[in-house]
Amino acid sequence: MSFSEHPIEWDDAKVSRLWNYYARTPPFSGIYFSKCFGDSILRLCRLPLQEPLEVLDFGAGPGFMWDHLLALGARWNYTALDFSSDSTNKARERAIGHAQFKGVHQINRLPTSLPAAAFDAVLLVEVLEHLTDEHLNSTLAEAVRLLKRGGVAVITTPNEEDLSQATKFCPECGAVFHEWQHVRSWSVGGMTARLKQHGLELRLAQTLDFTAQGLLAMGIRLARRLLLDSKKPPHIIAVYRKT
């Protein structure tokens, strides 16, 4: 067979292989977005940490959001869900036996077996940028199904990402792919329009740099952006309410 460069065609098996590898392999296992910035996400989404909310971490990976909830003393009841078996095993190991931990679900298709209208909030931390149209629609439909009326989806995603900046190439098979398996780029406006189709209305949205949280760091970052470049903030955090 002749060698040829080609964009990878992601399917469920390839996605699962990649995230199983990342979940068990340093340094990837230590740089998950939720591990690095989960505390900031929980603060910025403005949900009441001291209320006993039922919360689903959709695409939880190894369950790093649970660590942040514990550190902040949240009273939330936490359920995790992911497609990667290695990730769900890691999440189960870190939280099993705790009264507020309501289990981990490893799934391979949607909809899940979880009951409808069971959750006050669904966390979709760095999830939507990974989804093709087929999987995007089914994921949003499932998130809405699982939310109580008036419940919220908390979403983070890169802001207007240039996907080419994280392109990798496999010299053995010729596959060209985004290092983190991103397949689409979002803006606040584009995401809001798409989620409105699923009955989710915007409650709050912010573009920011999660690496520059804290007053001093934000001031330095803002000054650098004003003086040296005009790049847009790299991240979005948004909260959408089920109508």
Image (cartoon, rainbow, N blue to C red):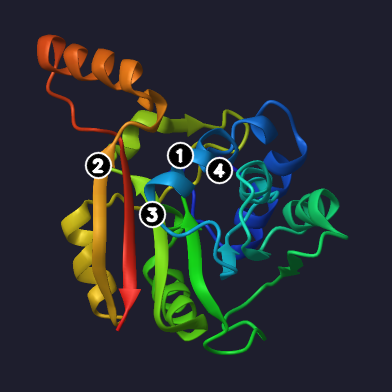
Q: CA distance from mark 2 to mark 3?
A: 15 Å
Q: Residue at x 29, y 49 (%)?
A: 185
- The mark nearer the N terminus, 4 or 2, is 4
Q: Are marks 3 and 1 in contact (CB under 8 Å)?
A: no
Dot label at residue 34: 4
Q: Are marks 2 and 3 in contact (CB under 8 Å)?
A: no
- The mark nearer the N terminus, 2 or 3, is 3
Image coordinates for residue 42, horizontal then vertical, percent: 48, 48
Q: Mark 1 sits on what residue?
A: 40
Mark 4 or 3, closer to the camera: 3
Q: Which amino acid, by three-letter code, is at mark 3? A: Arg
Q: Mark 2 sits on what residue?
A: 207
Q: Is residue 206 left or right of residue 11?
A: left
Q: Is residue 8 visible?
A: yes
Q: CA distance from mark 2 to mark 1?
A: 13 Å
Image coordinates for residue 226, horizontal then vertical, percent: 11, 16
Q: Residue at x 39, y 50 (%)?
A: 156
Dot label at residue 97: none
- Judged from the image, the secondary structure of the residue bearing numbered disc 3 is loop
- The mark nearer the N terminus, 2 or 1, is 1
Q: Is residue 4 visible?
A: no
Q: Are marks 4 and 1 in contact (CB under 8 Å)?
A: no
- The mark nearer the N terminus, 4 or 1, is 4
Q: Residues within 10 Å of mark 4 (few under 14, many from 20)?
A: many
Q: CA distance from mark 4 to mark 1?
A: 9 Å
- Judged from the image, the secondary structure of the residue bearing numbered disc 4 is helix
Image coordinates for residue 45, horizontal then vertical, percent: 39, 53
Q: Mark 3 sits on what residue?
A: 46
Image coordinates for residue 186, horizontal then vertical, percent: 27, 52
Mark 4 or 1, closer to the camera: 1
Q: Which amino acid, by three-letter code, is at mark 2? A: Thr
Which quarter of the image is occupied by the C terminus?
bottom left
